[in-house]
Image (spheres, helix red, strand yellow):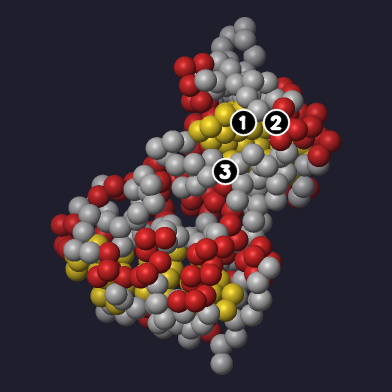
Amino acid sequence: MKIGVPRELKVKENRVACTPAGARMLINQGHQVWVETQAGLGSGYADEQYAASGATIVPTAEAAWDVDMVIKVKEPIPSEYPLLRKGLLLFTYLHLAANRPLTDVLCSSGTTAVAYETIQVGRRLPLLEPMSEIAGRMSALVGAYYLSRAQGGKGVLLGGVPGVLPGKVLIIGGGTSGINAGRVAAGMGADVTILEVDLEKMRFLDISLHGSTHTLYSNEQNLLETLPSIDLLIGAVLVPGAKAPKLITREMLRVMKPGSVFVDIAIDQGGCAETSRPTTHEDPVYLEEDVIHYCVANMPGAYARTATQALTNATIPYAQKIANFGFPEVTRRVPELVSGINVFEGQICSQAVADAHELPFQPFHLN
């Protein structure tokens, strides 16, 4: 199979879909890997490293897309839409439930689109987990940064100092990103509360996290009672493949103290607050109801080297199987890939995506 690795075009997206080591793994199994020039530069990988692994360096995006399968990090942006075509397999993060234009283009182009974030094994999302881990840990770091008075925050140091109480962090959601946010915030010395609805998960959090971390059953009343005393609010809500539920209303934000910070990790899926809108690493924050909002839609791109390595560790084994067995035949051997198929032969094969846009749903079936 001929596999393309184009350069990412999203603003300040420095990740790349495949490391030179990942390229070598694919090439050693008899496949061709075409890497767009400078695709790995933002993650610290030079063209020469890819060439040494056996990859072919191509000068244009068009060449990197003229393949059997394109592996990417982020969803195509409008300038890449003309490169989508029938017979192409696109393997990347898609987040289609929050992106109607891309959904329509994928259906009309005939591209087969397999989304990292909806591949499910039991209750796990193995290709989303590495980026959720990074985004979760990062949320505590950026939240602490924007709490400083110099950045417009209320001037609270999350860890406090002797004689001064630590800052308070509220995390909505105890999944992969939530638990990682809690781990880092607690490591800073903050007083952390995680809202969750799964009692089994709360027991796990209670055992595994730092002593300054507490769990609280997630409902509107508990949220309303907790928000007035919070310094940093982190939205870590996830419904696999679907739009994030709007759990935070504008009225709720009004009870928070001016200069508090809200980090919405769920922004890729539309955000979990009424006031959330996507931002970029170039212009990451805005103010709503006197609360600083950080809603960057590709948070792990800030730590591109770590994120690229973690992503490749998770995705390349699946890319190998797709290349080795072909698509869609690979689904017989790797059945969890069926949950990743969002669009196939012009039809939406993800119930969550179809529901989000009120479009017809066609379950994937291998003849």
Q: Is residue 346 left or right of residue 224?
A: left
The local secondary structure at tag 1 comes to: strand
Residue 77, labelled with which disc?
A: none
Whether residue 119 is visible here, answered yes or no, is yes
Type of amino acid at the residue the image marks with label 1:
Glu
User: Quadrant where the C terminus lies?
Assistant: bottom right
Residue 253, labelled with which disc?
A: 2
- Furthest residue to the right? 221
The local secondary structure at tag 3 comes to: loop
- Quadrant of the rendered image containing residue 73: bottom left
- Quadrant of the rendered image containing residue 29: bottom left
Q: CB of mark 1 within 8 Å of CB of mark 3?
A: no
- Residue toward you, 31 or 297: 297
- The percent coordinates of residue 326 (x first, y second) are 41, 83
User: Quadrant where the N terminus lies?
Assistant: bottom left
Q: Identify the residue position indicated by label 3 in the image.
A: 277
| Residue ID at (30%, 58%) | 7
Q: Is residue 18 above or below residue 112?
A: above
Q: Identify the residue position indicated by label 1 in the image.
A: 288
